[in-house]
């Protein structure tokens, strides 16, 4: 049976970034944010609003992918801090933001969605192929 999709949802229609890894349950994308090259999202394949809409096994499976991405980003760009967030206010399709942060990035110590602290901040160099391989090795 196909996964339920919502026709007006951008994460049902599009990947939401460059796909680094995927299976039938979820995908990992590199967002392509100019200020944050090391900004990934883990996006559930089907259209679900909240973590508590998943059963316990699905929650654990999704978080295992989130933690694999966090670990891969830590190895790849050695950030000062990792940020994990699940908001979905703008796009209510379950996804996690996994963002490598640096003391001198554009918004630090604020969230990346807050007012910028500086005009241009540090941008960690990311090799998408190497990052994809690192994620795959952890899953
Ligand atoms: Zn959706």
Image (cartoon, rainbow, N blue to C red):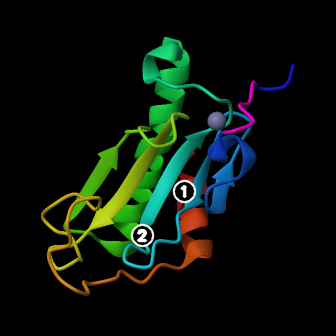
Q: Is residue 5 left or right of residue 127?
A: right
For label 1, the crowd category at 10 Å Cα-Cα, with few meaning under 14, some 14 to 19 and many 20 or more, is many
The residue tagged 2 is: 38
Label 2 – label 1 distance at C-alpha: 13 Å
Q: Position of residue 57 (x, y in %)?
A: 53, 17
Q: Position of residue 60 (x, y in %)?
A: 47, 25
Q: Quadrant of residue 9?
A: top right
Q: Secondary structure at mark 2?
A: loop
Residue range highlighted in magenta: 4-8
Q: Position of residue 90 (x, y in %)?
A: 46, 43
Q: Is residue 11 left or right of residue 63?
A: right
Q: Secondary structure at mark 1?
A: helix
Task: Decide which of 89, 37 is in the foreground and name it.
Answer: 89
User: In which quadrant will I find the C terminus?
Assistant: top right
42 inside magenta stretch: no
* Earlier-in-chain disc, 2 versus 1: 2
Residue placed at 12% from the left, 64% from the top?
Answer: 109
**Ligand 1: image quarter:** top right
């Amino acid at each position: 049976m196909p996964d339920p999709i919502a026709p007006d949802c951008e994460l049902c229609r599009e990947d939401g970034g460059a796909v680094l890894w995927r299976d039938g349950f979820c995908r990992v994308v590199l967002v392509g944010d100019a200020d944050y090259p090391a900004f990934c999202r883990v996006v559930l394949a089907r259209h679900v609003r909240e973590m508590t809409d998943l059963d316990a096994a699905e929650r654990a499976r999704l978080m295992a992918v989130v933690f694999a991405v966090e670990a891969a980003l830590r190895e790849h760009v050695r950030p000062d801090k990792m940020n994990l967030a699940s908001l979905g206010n703008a796009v209510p399709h379950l996804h996690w933001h996994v963002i490598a942060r640096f003391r001198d990035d554009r918004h630090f110590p604020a969230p990346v969605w807050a007012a910028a602290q500086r005009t241009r901040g540090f941008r960690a160099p990311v090799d998408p192929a190497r990052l994809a391989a690192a994620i795959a090795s952890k899953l």
